[in-house]
């Protein structure tokens, strides 16, 4: 009975994230295909971090951080379906993260080509922090680096805060290895250590701002149109994500933050409970491990 209940909850959970009622992610085949290794092995930092439930918090935090740059914000507002199909946009992001982390080389190349094709269409103008008009292009290494850092730093900080699973090699290993993920997208200047990552983030501080457009997206991120049960839990995950932002960014956003003594233990407990509730089945990792086993046979 417990396994049946877990299977049902797990199916609904995966269906919410991937947008497929079956609960099987559409990119499952890409992870299962082939026999060779991908960028990372099961004992390396990116695999460990991205298979953890703390990524649920990290994904929200990454979107909050990205929204502070008016260039990346313009790309989201003008070229994504985040308002009309928020779960569809979420699924697209999860697809890239999942395939890049767990798939074999040939699937990685196809996924990178898909993302490069999407980036080629994302261009236009935005008003920068000083009020000047600038051109933006999702393939621009400067903007691409900001998006990469926002994701990487967010997943790292949320794992450090809300997961009890050690990161093999620590933060430096995660940052150095995850830099491989953006090389197929044309970015070769990604940080290779925590100190390099922190230094890179600081170089963007004078470009970040909270405008009326930013407030619109931040409000949407705070209260997205989710099913009521998912929305209830999302509120906790949102606060958990916001709590881990540097204080200077919290001041820019201007939203009150719940106390860490309350949020951290509740979030840790909820993520553990969710992991138990959905059960041991993990189609993506199972497919990746089966592929690696075929390659070693």
Image (cartoon, rainbow, N blue to C red):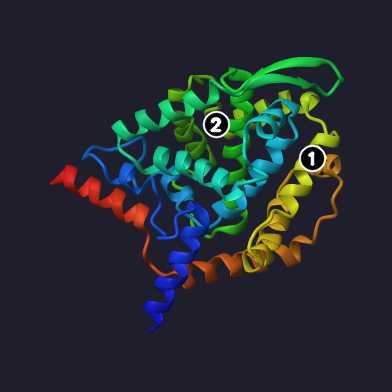
Helix or strand or loop: what does disc 2 sit on?
loop
Residue that label 2 marks: 193
Q: Position of residue 244 (x, y in %)?
A: 70, 50
Q: Check the picture and name the quadrant holding the N terminus.
A: bottom left
* Residue depicted at x 38% and y 45%: 27
Direction from residue 262 to residue 99 in the image, left or right: left
Q: Position of residue 270 (x, y in %)?
A: 60, 68
* Residue depicted at x 48% and y 65%: 12
5 or 261: which is nearer to us? 5
193 or 40: which is nearer to us? 40
Q: For residue 114, which numbered disc appears in the image?
A: none
Q: Quadrant of residue 3?
A: bottom left
Q: Quadrant of residue 76?
A: top right
Above or below, 243 relative to 124: below
The answer to whether marks 1 and 2 mark residues whose Cβ atoms lie closer than 8 Å is no
Q: Dot 1, crowdedness within 10 Å: few (<14), some or many (≥20)?
A: some
Residue that label 1 marks: 249
Q: CA distance from mark 1 to mark 2?
A: 22 Å
Query: Nearer the viewer's eye, disc 1 or disc 2?
Result: 1
Above or below, 265 relative to 175: below
* Residue depicted at x 57% and y 43%: 89
104 or 43: which is nearer to us? 104
Q: Dot 2, crowdedness within 10 Å: few (<14), some or many (≥20)?
A: some
Helix or strand or loop: what does disc 1 sit on?
helix
Q: Position of residue 133 (x, y in %)?
A: 80, 16
Whether residue 248 is visible, yes or no, is: no
């Amino acid at each position: 009975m417990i396994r049946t209940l877990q299977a049902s909850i797990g199916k609904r959970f995966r269906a919410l994230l991937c947008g497929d009622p079956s609960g099987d992610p559409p990119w499952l085949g890409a992870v299962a295909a082939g026999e060779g290794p991908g960028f990372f092995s099961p004992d390396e930092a990116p695999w460990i971090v991205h298979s953890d439930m703390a990524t649920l918090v990290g994904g929200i935090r990454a979107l909050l951080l990205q929204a502070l740059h008016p260039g990346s914000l313009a790309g989201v507002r003008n070229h994504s379906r985040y308002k009309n199909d928020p779960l569809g946009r979420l699924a697209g992001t999860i697809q890239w993260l999942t395939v890049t982390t767990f798939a074999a080389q040939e699937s990685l190349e196809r996924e990178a080509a898909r993302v490069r094709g999407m980036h080629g269409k994302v261009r236009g103008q935005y008003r920068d922090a000083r009020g000047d008009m600038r051109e933006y292009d999702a393939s621009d290494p400067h903007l691409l680096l900001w998006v990469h850092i926002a994701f990487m730093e967010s997943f790292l900080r949320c794992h450090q805060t809300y997961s009890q699973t050690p990161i093999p090699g620590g933060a430096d290993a995660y940052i150095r290895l995850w830099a491989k993920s953006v090389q197929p997208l044309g970015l070769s200047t990604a940080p290779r250590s925590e100190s390099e990552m922190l230094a890179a983030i600081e170089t963007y501080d004078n470009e970040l701002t909270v405008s009326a457009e930013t407030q619109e997206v931040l409000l949407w991120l705070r209260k997205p149109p989710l099913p009521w049960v998912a929305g209830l839990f999302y509120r906790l995950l949102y606060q958990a994500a916001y709590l881990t932002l540097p204080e200077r960014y919290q001041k820019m956003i201007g939203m009150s933050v719940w106390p860490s003594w309350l949020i951290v233990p509740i979030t840790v407990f909820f993520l553990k409970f969710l992991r138990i509730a959905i059960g041991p089945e993990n189609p993506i990792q199972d497919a990746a491990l089966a592929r690696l086993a075929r390659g070693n046979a």
